[in-house]
Each structure stands twice: as C-alpha cells, then as structure tokens.
Amino acid sequence: MKRIFIDREKCDGCKNCTVACMQAHRATPGTVYDLDLLDRKNEARHTIVSDGKGRYTPVFCRHCAVPDCVGACMSGALKKEPDTGHVQYDEKRCGTCFMCVMSCPYGNVKPDKATRSKILKCDFCKDDPEGPNCVRACPKKAIWVEEVEVL
Ligand code: SF4
Ligand code: SF4
C-alpha cells in the first residue's frame, strides 16, 4: 500500500501542503485563487506542528496496519479498504460519537470545525488519479508517497 512519509528536517512550515489539502477538499468548486482560507468548511485534513523555535513537523494519517480509529468506530463509518489499505470514512454511517477522535494515537482524526457533526481525516485524495495533493504542493520535498509492504 501507499503511505505518506515525512522528513521534518526539510519542512519549513510554509503550509503549501495545507492549502493544497484545503483546495482538494473545499466545500464549493473554484480555483486556489478564490479559496477562502478562513472558511471552516474548507478545513485541511492534516496539521503542521510548530515547536515555536522554527522547527516544524508535518503530521499526516498513517493509514495504520491495525487502525485504532477503525477499531473504535461502532457504526462502521471508518473502514480500512482491502484494495488500497487506506482508511476511509463514510459520513452517512457516522454516529458523531467521536470515539475515533479519542482513539487515534497521533491526533489524525478531528471533528469538523464547521458543524461538529462529522469527522475529518486524510482520504489520500482518493478521487484524484495523481494522488495526494499535499505531496505535489510541497516545495521542499518534505513529504512524499512510498509503497510499503503491510504484513
Ligand atoms: S486516523 Fe490515526 S489511527 Fe486512524 S489510520 Fe490514521 S493514524 Fe491510524
Ligand atoms: S509544504 Fe512541505 S515544507 Fe511546506 S509545510 Fe508542508 S511539508 Fe512543510
């Protein structure tokens, strides 16, 4: 399966990846030039964590081999896809219990800020044949996609 890898030494916190994620998942169609960065409906799926001293860590869903978020979801809204290995979310099945939010050891699932009625997590830009938009947007090559073997 494919996973996003990070090199925190290369990340300078520019957040180009964050804007790319927002654009890829924005609420209404449009170009990046009219993307409202303050609109909560356009929230990104990952975070760039700053230590306040100029060091940044991109934090992305690992699409874990045994995902705690899937194990915690009682309504079947989160599922590890057998063909890709990616953990995907079905909003229609979500019971808004946020057990997944509490279960992810890496903080990679969050309630959506706009409605607090669903969760947001990385979907690996599943509908884009070119793969995750964040990766293509990073000018430092601090994030990349790699094929990994899952045993
Ligand atoms: S949301 Fe968290 S627990 Fe679920 S697959 Fe991603 S990193 Fe793993
Ligand atoms: S685009 Fe690359 S360098 Fe910029 S914040 Fe994201 S990971 Fe870091």
Image: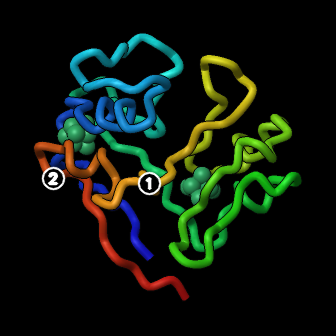
Q: Relative to residue 102, is residue 31 drawn left or right? A: left
Q: Which secondary structure, mark 1?
A: loop
Task: Name the one closer to the observer, 57 or 111.
Answer: 111
Residue 127's mark? 1
Quarter of the image where the N terminus is located: bottom left
Quadrant position of residue 20: top left
Task: Name the one closer to the observer, 118 or 106.
Answer: 118
Please say whether residue 19 is visible from this viewpoint. Answer: yes
* Residue at 30% in and 47% down: 133
Position of residue 45 measured from the top left corner of the image (x, y, whole percent): 48, 38
Q: Identity of the amino acid at label 1?
A: Asp
Residue that sits furthest to the bottom in the current view: 151
Q: Relative to residue 45, is residue 14 drawn left or right? A: left
Position of residue 51 measured from the top left corner of the image (x, y, whole percent): 34, 30
| Mark 2 CB lies closer than 8 A to ligand 2 | yes
Quadrant position of residue 69: bottom right
Q: Is residue 143 above or below residue 83?
A: above
Q: Relative to residue 95, is residue 85 drawn left or right? A: left
Please say whether residue 11 is visible from this viewpoint. Answer: no
Position of residue 127 measured from the top left corner of the image (x, y, whole percent): 44, 54
Q: Quadrant of ligand 2?
A: top left
Nearer-N-terminus badge (2/1): 1
Position of residue 37 measured from the top left corner of the image (x, y, whole percent): 36, 16
Residue 141's mark? 2
Q: Is residue 102 above or below residue 43?
A: below
